[in-house]
Amino acid sequence: MKLDTRAISISLVILATIGVFYVLVVGKAFLVPLAVALMIWYVINAMSRSFAKIIPWIKQPNWISMLLAILSIGLFISLTVDLIQNNVANVQESIPKYRDNFNNISNKISQLLPSQAVDNLPKFSELLKGVEFAPILTSFTDNVVAMISNITLVLIYVAFMLAEQGTFRKKISEIFPDQAKRGSVMSILSHAQEDIQTYLWIKSVTSIVTGLVSYFILKLVGVDFAAFWAFTIFMLNFIPTVGSIIATLFPAMLALIQFDTLLPFLVVLIGVGSIQVFVGNVLEPKLMGNSLNVSPFVVMMSLTLWGSIWGIAGMFLSVPITVMMLIVFAHFDRTRYIAVLLSGDGSLKFAKQTEKALEDIKN
């Protein structure tokens, strides 16, 4: 009987998992804008609290700090859309010129190689000429445009979230009249909010630093559309590991096909790559410490999983979603082992703090 019960439980878990992934894939058009809106809502509230701390005459978050946060996010989104729309068209117009430059470089490389080496590498020049950067750049710019195509829907979601957040605590109180349960739910939400905001703030600061330094390098070399590529580097840094690699390769590839020599390509590759290595391996770990406590392997698995389900948007959201899952799993006895597996060192300090708070409430 026990075996049958266990088999039924396992079967239900498998079916539930399949059902969840089916909904995530089929409901992508609805869920992705909603998830992005949730992240923007988090950022707006974090900025509101920051403005309340920075401005002396605002003692706590209120409508003034919230208005400043909304205006700041609105200005950022407006500048972003304008930058992308202006530069994507220019990049696509320059693709034929870049193709010709790349073909010239291919011919030069073929001529520099010893004849014996060329013989040992059949059709080497044809292979180089067959590499087309135009489709790569076109695909990249199309993906960037697609990311902002649903911006109106996202902003509508954000507006409704902001309008209803004042009644959120009242709803929680009605749903969980028991004080202990209500305290547990509020603790989960509070820790999720704090950790996600910590991640977003630190990633924003480090990405801004990376983007600015990369902009000066690109400007110094003379790479076309330096501001656009610096902004792209800033955005791609929110994607763990893979984003840094792509953020280095794209401007380096552009330098390769823009100039007739390899020196600009090497300068951009080494310069931007060094900044990425410094920020990713020195600056970010120093700022974050163990605040998130998520296993690096889990981060990579999450990046792959959410990227395969939701594409580029899933890559951006992979870490916040993983952090939220870790916090939720840690607050329930039956799922705590999953949180331990997801954590970096196996410790769940925030869960212990919540347990102590609940004990205080009961006493």
Image (cartoon, rainbow, N blue to C red):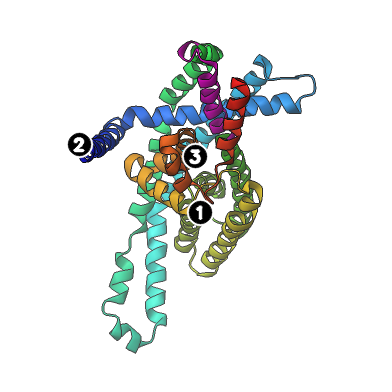
Chain part drawn in magenta = 174-195
The one nearer the camera, 217 or 150, is 150
Residue 66: percent from left, percent from top = 63, 20
Secondary element at tag 2 = loop
**Left or right: residue 346 compared with residue 47:** left
At label 3, which amino acid type do we have?
A: Val
Considering every residue shown, the one lying at the far right of the view is: 56
Q: Earlier in the sequence, mark 3 or mark 1?
A: 1
Badge 2: how crowded within 10 Å, few (<14), some, or many (20+)? few
Q: Earlier in the sequence, mark 2 or mark 1?
A: 2
* Residues at discs 3 and 1 in contact (Cβ within 8 Å): no
Q: Is residue 244 above or below residue 184?
A: below
At label 1, which amino acid type do we have?
A: Ser
Alpha carbon of mark 2 to alpha carbon of mark 1: how far?
53 Å
Secondary element at tag 1 = helix
Badge 3: how crowded within 10 Å, few (<14), some, or many (20+)? many
**Left or right: residue 304 compared with residue 208:** left
Q: Is residue 331 in view?
A: yes
